[in-house]
Image: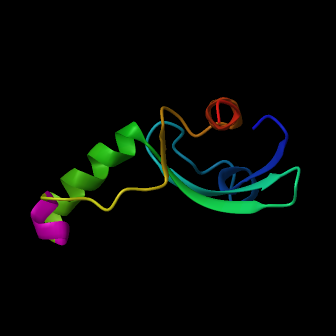
């Protein structure tokens, strides 16, 4: 899937206020044939943060489970996300 357009929430919405290694975002992918996909993306570190928050505030049975995003990445950067999408 090398031919696509990519919209990244962190580039459009308050671009200077994101934690590259510990955050989440939404992305939109438009393929050359016109198909469009929306995805929720988390960093690996944000998963840890979410579990710890759930343990503290009691959500998701005190961190017993987490409803996952569509994609996990090391960092919220265009380069990282594009590399992952190109392998499909």
The stretch of residues the image draws in magenta is 59-63
Decide which of 5, 13 is in the foreground and name it.
5
Picture coordinates of residue 11 (x, y %)?
A: 73, 50
* 45 within the magenta span: no
Quadrant where the C terminus lies? top right
Q: How many callouts does the rendering have?
A: 0
> Is the residue 13 above or below the residue 86 in the image?
below
Picture coordinates of residue 68 (x, y %)?
A: 36, 56
Farthest front residue?
A: 33
Residue drawn at (20%, 62%) of the image = 54
Q: Main secondary structure of the magenta part?
A: helix
Quadrant where the N terminus lies? top right
> Is the residue 34 above or below the residue 4 in the image?
below
Q: Quadrant of residue 67?
A: bottom left
Picture coordinates of residue 57 (x, y %)?
A: 16, 68
Q: How is the image coloured?
A: rainbow
Q: Quadrant of residue 78?
A: top right
Asked if residue 70 lies left or right of residue 85, the reply is left
Asked if residue 83 lies left or right of residue 21, the reply is right
Picture coordinates of residue 6 (x, y %)?
A: 77, 49
Q: Quadrant of residue 33?
A: bottom right
> Is the residue 76 above or below the residue 10 in the image?
above
Residue drawn at (19%, 59%) of the image = 65
């Amino acid at each position: 899937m090398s031919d696509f357009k990519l919209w990244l929430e962190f580039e459009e919405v308050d671009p200077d206020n994101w934690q590259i290694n510990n955050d989440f975002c939404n992305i939109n992918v438009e393929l050359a044939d016109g198909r469009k996909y929306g995805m929720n993306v988390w960093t690996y570190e944000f998963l840890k943060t979410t579990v710890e928050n759930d343990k503290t505030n009691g959500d998701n049975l005190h961190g017993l489970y987490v409803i996952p995003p569509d994609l996990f990445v090391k960092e919220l950067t265009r380069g990282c996300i594009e590399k992952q999408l190109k392998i499909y």
